[in-house]
Image: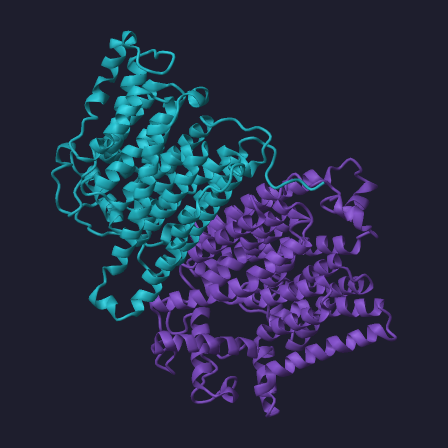
Chain colours: A purple, B cyan
Amino acid sequence: MENWSLISLCVLLGLTARWAVSFHSYSGAGKPPMFGDYEAQRHWQEVTYNLPVHEWYFNTTNNDLNYWGLDYPPLTAYHSLVCAYVAKLLNPEWVELYASRGYESHSHKLFMRATVLFTDILIYIPAVLLYCFYFCDGSSKQKVATAFCILLYPGLILIDYGHFQYNSVSLGLALWGILGLGLGWDLFGSLAFTLALNYKQMELYHSLPFFCYLLGKCIKQGLTWRGFFHLVKISMTVLVTFALCWMPFLSDPKQPLQVLHRLFPVGRGLFEDKVANTWCSLNVLIKIKTLLSRETQLFLSFALTLLFVLPSSLKLLSKPTLWQFKLALVNTSLAFFLFSFQVHEKSILLVALPVCLVFNEIPLIATWFLLTSTFSMLPLLLKDGLLLPYVVTSLAFLFLSLYLLSALERSTEEELRLGLYRKLTQRWLPKLNLSRIIKWKFWFSLAAMAALSFTSVWLKPPAKLPDLFPVLVSVLSFLHFLGFIIYFNQVQLMEPQRKKSQKKTN
Amino acid sequence: TVMAAPMTNDQSWFYALALGVSFLKCLLINAYHSTDFEVHRNWLALTHSLPVSQWYYEATSEWTLDYPPLFAWFEYGLSHIACFFDKEMLVVPNLNYASPATVLFQRLSVIVADVVFFYAVKECCKCLREDKGKDLLGKPSFILTVLLLWNFGLLIVDHIHFQYNGFLFGVLLLSIARHCQNRHFEGAFLFSVLLNLKHIYLYIAPAYGIYLLRCFCFTQSNADGSLQWRSFSVVRLVILGTIVLSTFAVSFGPFIALPALFKIWHRPNGARGFLRCLVICALGSFMFGWHVHEKAIMMAILPLSLLAVDSRKDAGIFLMLSVTSHYSLFPLLFTTQELPIKIFLMLLFTIFSLASLKTLFRKGGALLNPLEVTYLLGLIPLELICEFVYPLTVWQKTFPFLPLMLTSVYCALGVTYAFIRLYISLLTCSDTTKKTKMQ
């Protein structure tokens, strides 16, 4: 069968899965007075349509920031404005100032879901297809299979089409950025990534690798003339893009400051709710949230994050290849997720995107990580009534990646890149079959996650520990993520000087 | 070197396709369901709560039991599992009861019952000619499996609209497969089981009757394929007697197939001729029968899939018929929420069937002539007008039936054309080349 028909079949299946998930409930459905993220997005359409630009981020009589005030950068606001115009055409009641608060109807839900599908088709899906065709090794069937698996990653589908968010826009733009950089179109890549950054400030998790990669490339070109010039061009692109995005806010010095204040709520504390990172997990044993002062917490978080991103970034700086870039993206964003301030469980999607990009090279570990990331969001998904799509998409994804990408067969020690682990165990346990151990751990971990999912749904927690299951889920995920950050750092830092021909034989 | 996508294991792709479509069906659990959902819930309730003598008299709900007894027993069996999901659905006066547990149970029962269909498809693949050495996507058995397991009509009628056609067609296809494998007793038995599950299959009973009488009761043919009267077997006739008697149905439809029936009496072509006659009976009854539902077209399409992967001409007819009739099912799902699903799935099935059949029969020119292609492409503006443009015009209020009428008329052209072509191909096909293949 020709390539184009295979690709269209995969895209159609991906779209069907997305739309079928969208039949289910969304965040905060039928839960006044605050509802959830769905109402937040609707409210932003209302605010951006009815109020002038300089009032969007400020607390005024018309704009109560306590009721889902805007806390994403301007591009989200512009996107909401465009959606609001369409909403006004279809049914003005959806964006009436004040009167539309808590508006819920079947047709409104269809409209909102359709906006997500639209941007997905426009931005994220083409980026995935282009990535697989330009940067994946193997036959064209292999590339289509990889694209298919990436498109069916459950975490993104469940959050965007279930819980309700527009992560496909920011992740899609970031992916365009990576594509640009990979193809050597640095200016285009920087432009795309800056747009992603201006859509969601969480993309800062990815900014350090972009910076190090570009800087490393410029240094390699020689810092005196060509490299320096190139650096200047990139910086100009970034600055101009920022200026264009923030233009309406640059008239008054108070504006950008207020926007930044909304984007980075330093006053909100080390973490909120249950999230699978160090601080929340540590809090189970030692109540660090109350023990340490705010300044100490900030300092500790900063120090540990820096500690974990430094090796990866320095390695990327010294060796700016696409492979290193992808691994650095994984390592940096995972470090930020584990150690940073005010992390939400949905931020794991920022780590999931670069892991999707190493799917073709290390399918088993990538599948493992992506399933864990979906599992880590289980409490959130259960709250939103998304149990059925969670189970179906996770099982389908597991099965597809094992079957189509032969993940279990391509798991020799060399393919799993266990170089350092082999060296460590060489002295004392030379006969250890690391590959088999990894596979056993994989199945055992999946069984544990399945069991915990089952108990979270069917069993009632004891009265003294009402949060038992969410805590267990986040601690289990945290332990997995800790293992993954060590593994991915090991892969990135221990990479030998490979020749291109050697790489293709994998 | 990097391995190609599927593993070298021979049959694993079948289970992968079956599992994949089951996952898709699970995702559609919360989609729109029609009144047929309440019909089946009512039947679960009345078979569970009432004694057998009352089943066909019970009329609290408007959806009285109108399928044969074997299906009623099937619902009775299901009702015992339904207890564990939600006892309230088994209470007869609970009209239109549709709690989440009820929806989950009923949807799951359709998905699980499809296992019969999976088994039948697997058996049908065994009847196809072997094609070793071809890559997986070009194998006839792979293409047939996708055409059957992922059939658009079955997906939207069974798993959205709500019915048990997968299970029933499984029995039909299994019966056909048994005839292809010369296990005629089993085939006939399965067909009589099918008739007792849903009497609509009477449409194709003549094909069964005449074929079995001709090929099974007369145990030998002459060298040129014509009848050898001396080889008549009374024993076989008696055994098949009950089935043959039931083929003489009252409705007008089956008599349209008379010339076709004469043809397979005169010069049967083994299993392939039988299948062709079956499809013609089904299609003839669809076109001329009494109180036909649009879903009845499925009875012609699924068996035709078997012929489509075997011969070029049939592939062309199959493409015309399947695309047209799948489009004719669109009005069944009239809700806005399901609109993207039906368009995506329709495109999925159409692109797959076009691309795979084109690759399978790439030697010998195009499968569809330009006129046919134009007709099929005309479905796109038809859909745009009927579902996107027309509702916004002023005529929507005064002539709301117009899009439905346009759809029916346009699709009728395609279906009639396919019917005529099939009939002609049956009456003019030659015996010699096909003797060795399917028998």
Residue sitting at 35 percent across and 64 percent down? B388
Residue A201 in view (yes/no): yes
Relative to the observer, which residue lies in front, B407 or A165? B407
Residue sitting at 54 percent across and 36 percent down? B363
Horizontal side, residue A496 vs residue B104: left or right = right
Q: In which quadrant will I find the N terminus of chain B? A: top right
Rendered position, A23 above or below B281: below
The number of numbered badges drawn on the structure is: 0
| x then y, percent, for residue A43 | 43, 77
Residue sitting at 62 percent across and 52 percent down? A369
| x then y, percent, for residue A367 | 61, 49
Residue A106 in view (yes/no): no
Residue A186 image-quadrant placement? bottom right
Residue B406 image-quadrant placement? bottom left
Rendered position, B371 above or below A236: above
Residue sitting at 49 percent across and 58 percent down? A158
In the image, farthest residue toward the top: B230
| x then y, percent, for residue B18 | 46, 39
Rendered position, A210 above or below A399: below
Q: In which quadrant will I find the C terminus of chain B? A: top left
| x then y, percent, for residue A44 | 46, 77
Horizontal side, residue B355 vs residue B8: left or right = left
Horizontal side, residue A71 vs residue A310: left or right = left
In the image, farthest residue toward the bottom: A252
Residue A40 image-quadrant placement? bottom left
Relative to the observer, which residue lies in front, A320 or A42? A320
